[in-house]
């Protein structure tokens, strides 16, 4: 066992990025002074904390070690090494609990059902003991955990549905003396409201020293361990993925076999090569260990090929659905015979994991999401080579398929489609899939899978077309994350020309041309973000950079960066006089850190443009402060003007407010032609309520047919402000007037498309959603009724939401974008009885 890096988090915020993107982002983040929490200390309060810890939520990406962490806790407790004040530890997985969806248990009955020893011992009164419940895998929960409407339950002997038991247990209504430990992947972290959680921790996997420790424990021979560690460090992709313990296990198994093999050969350097060798290693183990064959025998038999093809089909189809766990019918649908599959358990247990739940139900999953993505890419590649069918092209008709078969296969068409689909993804969920798909096209990689994968001829020309297409995409405006993944794709295709070109320019201190192309700037971003070493100096004056190209180098600072920035401002050696922090999400905590640097007598800053609403009277040199489009709040404004009036303050120019012009209070009118039939109008059409019975509204092309939504009649132009009173569970939003009205697809649902921007208001607090990306922003509201203000500056592309009280407006969130179509205000009423009312101003 190698210790994992576990840190205390701030909140259970949602992170919808692909988890490999999260790992790569973390790898580029400078190490901070963080305290690593031991598994045994998970319920022990930090120094200075008076409140006891009842419920812990631990988040972490797939395969990072969350389950192992809970098992380590239980093992140390069982072996009397830790937490001896705890009498019982009951570990559950949501996979097991899902099977009980239609059953009813009391809490005591549920414990007796899973842990029969407690029933045999006649233990029914858990209030007399210190009990820990471990609930592992919240992201895999298929139970309807409804914290708003679930029945109230306090009796541990009263039967109820499992979801009601869990809801009341988590809320602390049922057995409040118990301790709870819940684990989840980041995207599901917000399913449990922050008020129910006393501590949020994050499993960060292995730090760089822990990676080395793992491999040195795994390989006792110092020379072999050092060689493997050195090799992993030469590949950025492998080194990053080794943050994940299960990937370290795969890497160790592969490299050990390759080093011991008679053929020897080059060690795998890319993710595709690593997973190709992983399949080959497991196939050889199965052939020799379970079939009694020789090491020199072909390791792919017709049966094993068929099994791999079926697993690939399952991997791809479930990846398309977003499923990471599967059930027996899913396997049967993909042609996997469970009885026949058991013959290959020696190989498949290393690729596929089967878990027995209750009543002999079985749950299946791949050992890691990345392996599922690899097998999905293998399936798409094989299908195209064999039949010419592009599985990524949903519109490809059977009539076209026969034509495709008659002409020469062009693999680069498949690759181009895959590149386009990956770039469309808002969270990068196809990033790894794309890398694998491209890597499988290399003849060298195909030769390793000889017997399983058909080799393609004349592939170099096709791959060159793919390389050129990727470079073309790099020349377009892409985010840093998308650009980085495209360079990883070029790496899979063994093309490093763009990166080498820029590296030569950096070494020489000059470029051969007067201006970098967008693709070259993308390469520069990739080099800067992927570098293992700190860059001592990067002087942009050596290069002629366009404004568009420089935008690719934006920092994207968060509040975490402000501590370091504050120390720079207060340093005697700093000569920084102008600082523009616009478009950086600093948050209040970041502003406080920043203001401490402004107080320093060594601070030479003369102009600051930022979201800061904290300017100290000790900031001796600050001459200009631009707070346009920021929302310091009433208390912030009072502090701001108090600082300005101080005789020691040198501020000469202050810009505050949304704009130098004025904005208009807008009296909205509901568009009765757009109102869904489950929405009832009242108060002279100033109020709308969600009802169960359909209203007799006439047919109209503007009416929302399937969703409880409506728009306002007013066109929003210029600068507009309005206020809404709401109750229940509602969305308050701005949308393009041309949004689709009919159907049940995302295009019709406010907040789930790129044509609308929503603030979601409920008892849980406030969320924002745009283009199907949902972000928790505040837990400040739990009343049954509240008021929200909305401000739109259409020319500036700004949309802001505020919580309004009798004496203040509290800023919740601002969207910054470019509005390209006519805008309207709108609403969604999600639950029966919810309402919105237009407020007079």
Image (spheres, rainbow, N blue to C red):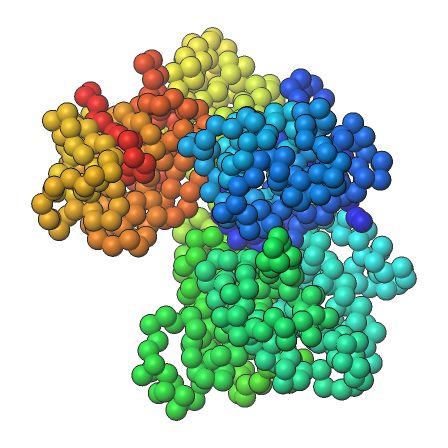
Nearer-the-camera pick, 777 or 493: 777
Visible in this render: residue 170? Answer: no
- Left or right relative to 574: residue 813: left
Give the quadrant of residue 263: bottom right
What residue appears at the point 45 percent right and 84 percent down from the top-left corner?
Answer: 387
Q: How many marks?
A: 0
- Residue 711, above or below 765: below
Name the quadrant of the C terminus: top left
Q: Give the farthest residue toward the right.
A: 221
- Left or right relative to 608: residue 454: right
Q: Position of residue 516 (x, y in %)?
A: 47, 59
Nearer-the-camera pick, 336 or 509: 336
Q: Position of residue 511 (x, y in %)?
A: 54, 61
Q: Position of residue 45 (x, y in %)?
A: 70, 25
Visible in this render: residue 326? Answer: yes
What residue appears at the point 64 percent right and 57 percent down from the top-left corner?
Answer: 356
């Amino acid at each position: 066992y190698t210790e994992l890096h576990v840190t205390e988090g701030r909140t259970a915020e949602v992170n919808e990025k692909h988890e490999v993107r999260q790992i790569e982002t973390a790898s580029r983040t400078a190490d901070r002074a963080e305290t690593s929490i031991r598994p045994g200390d998970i319920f022990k309060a930090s120094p200075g904390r008076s409140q006891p810890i009842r419920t812990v939520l631990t988040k972490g990406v797939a395969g990072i070690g969350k389950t192992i962490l809970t098992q380590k806790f239980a093992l140390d407790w069982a072996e009397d090494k830790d937490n001896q004040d705890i009498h019982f530890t009951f570990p559950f997985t949501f996979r097991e609990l899902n099977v009980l969806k239609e059953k009813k248990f009391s809490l005591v009955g549920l414990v007796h059902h899973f842990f029969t020893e407690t029933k045999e011992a006649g233990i029914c009164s858990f209030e007399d003991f210190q009990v820990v419940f471990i609930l592992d895998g919240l992201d895999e929960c298929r139970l309807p955990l409804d914290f708003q409407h679930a029945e109230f339950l306090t009796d541990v002997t009263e039967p109820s549905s499992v979801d009601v038991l869990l809801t009341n247990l988590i809320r602390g209504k049922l057995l409040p003396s118990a301790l709870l430990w819940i684990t989840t992947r980041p995207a599901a972290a917000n399913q449990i409201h922050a008020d129910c959680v006393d501590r949020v921790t994050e499993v960060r996997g292995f730090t760089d020293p822990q990676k080395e420790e793992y491999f040195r424990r795994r390989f006792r021979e110092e020379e072999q361990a050092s060689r493997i560690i050195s090799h992993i460090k030469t590949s950025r992709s492998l080194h990053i993925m080794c943050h994940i313990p299960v990937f370290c296990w795969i890497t160790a198994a592969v490299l050990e076999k390759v080093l011991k093999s008679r053929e020897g050969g080059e060690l795998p350097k890319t993710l595709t090569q690593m997973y190709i060798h992983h399949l080959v290693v497991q196939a050889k183990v199965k052939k020799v260990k379970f079939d009694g064959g020789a090491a020199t025998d072909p390791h792919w038999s017709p049966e094993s090929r068929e099994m791999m093809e079926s697993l690939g089909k399952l991997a791809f189809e479930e990846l398309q659905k977003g499923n990471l766990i599967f059930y027996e019918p899913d396997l049967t649908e993909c042609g996997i015979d469970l009885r026949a599959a058991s013959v290959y358990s020696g190989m498949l247990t290393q690729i596929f994991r089967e878990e027995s739940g209750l009543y002999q139900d079985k749950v299946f999953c791949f050992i890691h999401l990345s392996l599922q993505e690899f097998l999905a890419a293998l399936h798409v590649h094989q299908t195209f080579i064999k039949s010419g069918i592009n599985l990524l092209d949903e519109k490809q008709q059977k009539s076209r398929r026969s034509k495709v078969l008659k002409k020469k296969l062009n693999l680069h068409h498949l690759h181009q489609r895959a590149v386009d689909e990956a770039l469309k993804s808002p969270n990068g969920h196809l990033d790894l899939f794309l890398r694998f798909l491209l890597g499988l096209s290399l003849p060298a990689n195909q030769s390793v899978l000889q017997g399983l994968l058909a080799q393609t001829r004349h592939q170099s020309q096709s791959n060159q077309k793919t390389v050129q297409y990727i470079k073309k995409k790099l020349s377009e405006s892409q985010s840093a994350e998308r650009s980085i993944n495209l360079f990883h794709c070029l790496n899979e295709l063994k093309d490093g020309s763009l990166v080498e070109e820029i590296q030569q320019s950096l070494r020489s201190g000059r470029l051969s041309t007067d201006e970098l192309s967008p693709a070259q700037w993308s390469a520069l971003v990739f080099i800067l973000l992927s570098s293992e070493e700190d860059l001592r100096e990067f002087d942009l004056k050596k290069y002629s950079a366009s404004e568009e190209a420089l935008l690719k180098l934006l920092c994207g600072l968060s509040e975490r960066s402000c501590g370091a920035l504050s120390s720079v401002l207060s340093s005697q050696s700093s000569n920084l006089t102008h600082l523009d922090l616009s478009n950086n999400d600093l948050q209040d905590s970041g502003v406080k850190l920043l203001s401490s640097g402004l107080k320093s007598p060594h601070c030479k800053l003369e102009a600051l443009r930022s979201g800061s609403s904290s300017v100290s009277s000790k900031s001796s040199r600050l001459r200009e402060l631009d707070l346009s489009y920021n929302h310091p709040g009433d208390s912030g404004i009072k502090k701001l003007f108090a600082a300005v009036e101080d005789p020691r303050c040198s501020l000469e120019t202050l810009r505050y407010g949304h704009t130098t012009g004025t904005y208009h209070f807008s009296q909205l009118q509901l568009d009765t032609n757009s109102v869904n039939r489950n929405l009832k109008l009242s108060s002279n059409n100033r109020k709308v309520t969600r009802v169960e019975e359909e209203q007799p509204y006439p047919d109209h092309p503007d009416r929302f047919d399937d969703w409880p939504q409506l728009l306002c009649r007013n066109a929003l132009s210029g600068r507009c402000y309005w206020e809404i009173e709401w109750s229940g569970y509602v969305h308050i939003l701005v949308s393009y007037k041309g949004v689709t009205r009919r159907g049940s697809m995302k295009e019709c649902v406010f907040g789930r498309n790129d044509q609308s921007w929503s603030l979601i208001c409920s008892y849980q607090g406030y969320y924002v959603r745009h283009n199907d990306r949902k972000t928790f922003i505040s837990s400040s509201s739990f009343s049954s009724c509240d008021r929200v203000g909305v401000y739109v500056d259409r020319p500036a592309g700004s949309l802001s939401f505020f919580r309004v009280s009798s004496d203040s407006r509290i800023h919740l969130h601002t969207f910054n974008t470019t509005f390209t179509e006519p805008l309207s205000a709108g609403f969604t009423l999600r639950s029966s009885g919810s309402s919105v009312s237009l407020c007079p101003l």
